[in-house]
Image (tube, helix red, strand yellow):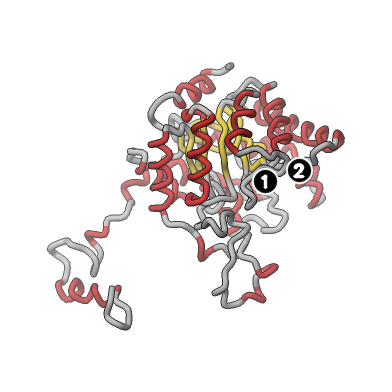
């Protein structure tokens, strides 16, 4: 493995301190008004680089170990859809440049290049496979030239596409992390075996870290992680869920339904995914619990994907036993005017605290 940082990353996996991954740039930039839902092309990298830099800083302060270059969906197929293929190379290069610049302010961080689902791959199609290979190759060539430490391949729903991603990534001699995206069926789209079996296949193909990301929230991703660590050495397993409350009946954020939606006719398609998921965002405590349980399994790489924000990542870092730059602002309810316990607080406000929590029947 070339490069000290790559070797350092691999060594970190074998420690008892998991690598913490911060993702979710696509959804967070859309929420902040810098990216259009639908095409989801990260033009913000070129149009508002300061916004990306700010989010990188926030994740860094929250305790993330991975500075993920925002090149998710910065591939040729996506740029073709919006008629801006001429922006492809500058977008990819600048994303890594921004990540590297911010990482310099957060010692110890690893800069990761990023490739993802192409939405082109079709099992058995040689033409599609060639297109996918070309997309991965050009993106990674630019990323490596700009100085990444490792490669994150994410949200891959086909075993065949994962194999291509690993084959291409290996050519660049960088550590490789790959996350499978598991839809509602619980399986990959082109493989009848278990997710754990698919992970073992890709690990044996030369992937350094393999696991699951996206689509599933902490509650429905964790059972998959328990299976994967039985097939792959736990320290080489990754898990970064979406920050949405999924259930066994609605195991992915795409399958969530909202019968209480007050304005269903205003929601595109009437579905919460992808722009009306707000009521289903998990708490920081749920993400922290996921990180804690993954660490107990020996998982070496954990984090957050779509929907996760800096407060989620900070909570995960603290659950892993860390104090981050942002921890100075972690919740301390002792000073709350009504719910707090500080002796200097006004007693009449503390006495009223119960009224804030009771329902109409008087119960808490």
- Seen in the picture, residue 75 relative to 220 is either above or below; the reply is above
Considering the numbered disc 1 on the image, is that residue within a helix, a strand or a loop? helix
Q: How many marks?
A: 2
User: Is residue 113 at least partly visible in the picture?
Assistant: no
Classify residue 342 as left or right of residue 327.
Answer: left
348 relative position to 54: left or right? left
Classify mark 1: residues with Cα within 10 Å, few (<14), some (14-19) or many (20+).
some
Picture coordinates of residue 222 (x, y %)? 48, 45
Tell me which residue sits at (54%, 44%) in the image: 23
Q: CA distance from mark 2 to mark 1?
A: 9 Å
Spot occupied by residue 27 in the image (x, y as percentages of width and height) = 59, 54
Mark with earlier residue (2, 1) = 1
Report the residue marked by disc 2.
Answer: 87
| Quadrant holding the N terminus | top right
**Residue ranking furthest to the bottom:** 360
Q: Position of residue 203 (x, y in %)?
A: 60, 27
Q: Position of residue 124 (x, y in %)?
A: 83, 36
Could you tell me which secondary element the residue under label 2 belongs to?
A: helix
Q: Is residue 354 depicted above or below 44 in this figure? A: below
Q: Name the residue rendered at 48%, 34% in the picture.
A: 301
Residue at the farthest top position: 2
Rendered view: 153 above or below 186: above
Can residue 34 be seen? yes
Q: Nearer the viewer, residue 282 or 194?
A: 194
**Mark 2–mark 1 contact, CB under 8 Å?**
yes
Question: Within 10 angstroms of label 2, few (less than 14), some, or many (20 or more) residues?
Answer: some
> Which quadrant holds the C terminus?
bottom left
Q: Which residue was labeled with disc 1?
A: 46
Residue at x-position 61% and y-position 23%: 174
């Amino acid at each position: 493995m070339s490069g000290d940082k790559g070797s350092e990353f691999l060594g970190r996996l074998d420690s008892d301190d998991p690598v913490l991954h911060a993702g979710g740039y696509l959804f967070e930039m859309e929420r902040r008004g810098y990216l259009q839902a639908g095409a989801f092309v990260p033009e913000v990298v070129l149009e508002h680089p300061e916004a990306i830099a700010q989010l990188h800083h926030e994740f860094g302060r929250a305790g993330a170990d991975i500075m993920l270059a925002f090149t998710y969906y910065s591939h040729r197929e996506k740029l073709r859809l919006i008629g801006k293929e001429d922006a492809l190379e500058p977008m990819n290069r600048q994303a890594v440049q921004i990540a590297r610049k911010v990482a310099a302010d957060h010692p110890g961080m690893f800069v990761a290049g990023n490739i993802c689902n192409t939405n082109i791959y079709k099992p058995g199609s040689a033409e599609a496979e060639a297109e996918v290979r070309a997309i991965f190759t050009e993106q990674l060539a630019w990323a490596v030239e700009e100085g990444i430490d490792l490669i994150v391949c994410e949200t891959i729903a086909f075993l065949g596409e994962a194999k291509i991603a690993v084959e291409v990534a290996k050519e660049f001699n960088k550590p490789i992390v790959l996350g499978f995206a598991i839809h509602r069926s619980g399986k990959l789209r082109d493989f009848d075996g278990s997710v754990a079996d698919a992970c073992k296949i890709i690990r044996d193909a030369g992937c350094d870290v393999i696991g699951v990301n996206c689509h599933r929230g902490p509650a429905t991703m964790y059972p998959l992680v328990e299976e994967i660590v039985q097939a792959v050495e736990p320290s080489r397993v990754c898990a970064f869920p979406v920050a949405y409350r999924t259930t066994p009946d609605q195991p992915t954020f795409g399958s969530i339904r909202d019968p209480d939606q007050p304005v269903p006719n205003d929601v595109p398609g009437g579905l919460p995914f992808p722009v009306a998921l707000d009521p289903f965002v998990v708490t920081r405590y749920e993400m922290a619990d996921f990180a804690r349980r993954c660490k107990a399994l020996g998982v070496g790489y954990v984090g957050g994907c779509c929907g996760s924000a800096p407060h989620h990542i900070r909570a995960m870092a603290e659950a892993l036993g860390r104090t981050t730059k942002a921890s100075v602002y972690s919740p301390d309810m002792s000073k709350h005017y009504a719910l707090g316990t500080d002796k200097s607080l006004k007693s009449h406000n503390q006495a009223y605290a119960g009224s804030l929590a009771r329902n109409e029947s008087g119960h808490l």
